[in-house]
Image (cartoon, rainbow, N blue to C red):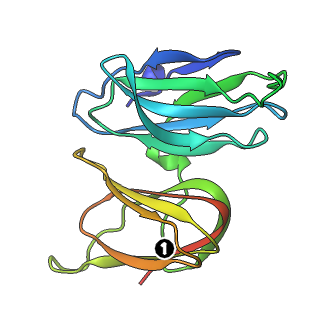
Amino acid sequence: MSVEALKSWSGWAGRTVEVPADSAGRPTLLEVRGGLTSSFHFRRAVGGRSTGSTLVTTVRGRRMRVVLPADSSGFTVERITVSDGASGFHRWHARIVGAEALPALTKEEREGKFTETFGYFQPKRYYEERRVLRWEFESQGSVTYCLATGGRPVDFPHYPPRPKGTFPLTHHGYVTISSPDKWRVSLL
């Protein structure tokens, strides 16, 4: 995607945003954030309607990167309100970013909290080589692997205490780690 093609959106209330499709059928990388006192659900949309699949829930103005799958037409935004109707005073922001904005997934163990998306674009030393993603959550969380060339994302939701797991990364793509608590991720 060229720099001219990068778009951004913002708003106070919930709405549906149509994202221009990539001509090659690849997923779109988004950087989103809510306000310091406002939180929002960003959900995947197909055909202008929400699928109910949450991409990310913003936390205290933090910038979070997520992958919008290739078959999506955009995303919907819903402001989170508490039982008394209060929802904060800040706007949400979203923008398309390039793969260079993502941290690289390497053998070095990374720690974090909430949601982060990593790029996996390491050349193979030989054709049959496969890297294996290793993850561990302090409580619950999910891992989503999306090929850079498009196709259906692979989701691994985990709810038991201290879940761990591995998954072979067959091709270049994006790995999104999401948890309300701490997580660790690396390549084997």
Using the image, determine if residue 148 lies above or below residue 18: below
- From where the camera sits, is residue 98 visible? no
**Residue 68: horizontal and vertical position, in percent?**
40, 37
Whether residue 32 is situated above or below residue 62 in the rendered picture: above
Q: Residue flagged by tag 1: what amino acid is it?
A: Thr
* Left or right of residue 37: residue 46: left
Q: Quadrant of residue 82?
A: top right
The structure residue drawn at horizontal position 56% and vertical position 28%, both measured from the top left corner, is 95
x%, y% of residue 175? 43, 58
Q: Viewer-proximal residue, 38 or 84?
A: 84
Considering every residue shown, the one lying at the far left of the view is 127
Q: How many marks?
A: 1
Q: For label 1, count other residues whose C-alpha is less than 10 Å away and answer few (under 14), some (14-19) or many (20+).
A: some
Say which element carries label 1: loop
Regarding residue 151, the answer to whether it shows in the image is: yes
x, y percent for residue 185: 53, 73
Taking depth in this image into account, of 175 and 125 the one nearest to the observer is: 175
Q: Using the image, determine if residue 59 lies above or below residue 72.
A: below
Q: Residue furthest front?
A: 83
Q: Residue at x 32, y 30 (%)?
A: 72
Q: Is residue 80 left or right of residue 126?
A: right
The residue that label 1 is drawn on is 106
Position of the C terminus by quadrant: bottom left
Along the line of sight, the residue nearer the viewer: 76 or 86: 86
Question: In the image, 89: left or right of 6?
Answer: right
The residue sitting at 67% across, 40% down in the picture is 58
Q: Is residue 97 left or right of residue 138?
A: left
Which residue is at a point 57% across and 37% down the rendered structure image?
31
Examine the image and state in which quarter residue 1 appears: top left
